[in-house]
Amino acid sequence: MKRNSNTDSEQRGPRFRLIPFDRDVLGEIWSSIERNRSRSLLTGFGVFWGIFMLLTLMGAGDGLRAILMAELQGFATNSGIFVADRTSKPYKGLSADRYWQMTTADIDHIRASVPEVEAVTGVLTVWGQSALYGENTSSCQAKGVFPEYTKIEEPSLKYGRYINKVDVDQERKVCVIGKRVYRDLFPGGGDPCGEYIKFGDTYYKVVGVDMSSGNISINGSADRSVTIPASVVQKLYNKGNNVDLISIVAKPNCKIKPILAQCRTLIAREHLLDPTDRKAIMEINLEEMFGIIDNLFKGINILIWLVGFGTLLAAAIGVSNIMMVTVKERTTEIGIRRAIGATPQMILSQIMSESVILTIIAGVGGIILSVMILSAADILVKGADIPPVSFQVSFTMATVALLILTFLGLLAGLPPSLRAMAIRPVDAMRDE
């Protein structure tokens, strides 16, 4: 004797199945949303505004970070700089307020004594002069460097080459000009290599054009510099073996801070300085500077997520409350559905589907507006004299935002759906 399949199903309990999203179901959901158009618009606006703020702030934050990092582009992040100044403390019988200078001997000493150093080099600068080419002039400074300087500040060469060891050893009068100097002296563009420009009283042959636009200035910005061999600066300007500053790069996986401390001790010992005299040996830790910038934007991103997600959560609560009111208003309708055979799971799916669709429609509108605003920002920055960056949000970010919206829509629809499931046909008729 066969058992009744319906009876067996009822004994096991109803199984939960989502309503398939065919045309009739979607039309019914849309009709329900449209019947309360004002309420739906006001409810969806919270979701719209939350996702719009989240993505716009994320895109703007990433764009600003890219602009700032582009300004620092080319500089070694694990590097540091020493600059000599007058002493502020007496030491071993020597008075304070002494003037002293670093030399190439300090560079050699650091290179030989600190194995964690990957590169160490000196820089000299000549200020207050202009470069001339024909009738064109450019206000700039001359920067005397050694070949190792490319490991501190990597050039972006458009034409030619950089200063090499032969240039330094043979004291060649050659130069690499920066971006702004190139535009001032050669407004017509083209390759200037082989041409001679005058800086001060000396003519230099142009061997390269550096288009770096970094905003870190190591004794003069790269775009306003005429870079020449350090040996030429030392000879022409009677600087002997002196250097204005010493730049150091640490080896990979080595922290620059303890390396700078070792180098400070070596320099102080050679020049009879108090190692704790921070004014006499001024120190710039670029690794810390880059770390501060990176941590700053990490904090900004966390704040943006907190503000955006908090706004979305508040909007989801609003959606849930509105759906609760809608369920109460549709008590009779739900009761009739139950009376003609609708299962609790069908009612649950109906209410939750309305909540999810309302949330997604509002959220997609926020995503579209956010992309449009960020695209406009992209167009505006293209005309500015800044490195090319993008203010757009990534596809991954938009996908994550859409998943968050769907999840919040499900959460918002769950309480009113459970309330709707609890409605019994008899109570619904009595309520009518």
Image (cartoon, rainbow, N blue to C red):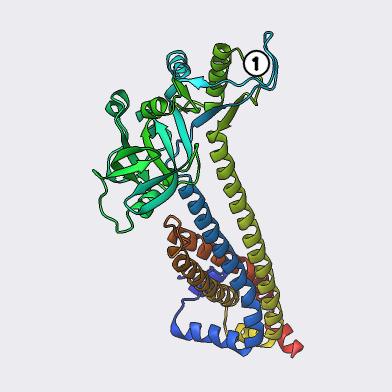
Residue at coordinates 60% horizontally, 46% vertically from top-left? 296
The quarter of the picture where residue 264 lies is: top right
Query: Where does residue 37 sit, x and y in percent of width and height?
Result: 62, 87
For this rendering, which residue is in front, 201 or 318? 201
**Amino acid on which the number 1 mark rests in the picture:** Asp
For residue 384, above or below residue 362: above
For this rendering, which residue is in front, 343 or 284? 284
For residue 93, above or below residue 308: above
Q: Is residue 143 left or right of 364 when viewed as pictured?
A: left
For residue 367, above or below residue 137: below
Q: Can residue 398 be seen in this view?
A: yes
Residue found farthest to the right: 431
For this rendering, which residue is in front, 45 or 68? 68
Query: Where does residue 62 sit, x and y in percent of width and height?
Result: 51, 55
| Residue at image mark 1 | 274
The quarter of the picture where residue 231 lies is: top left
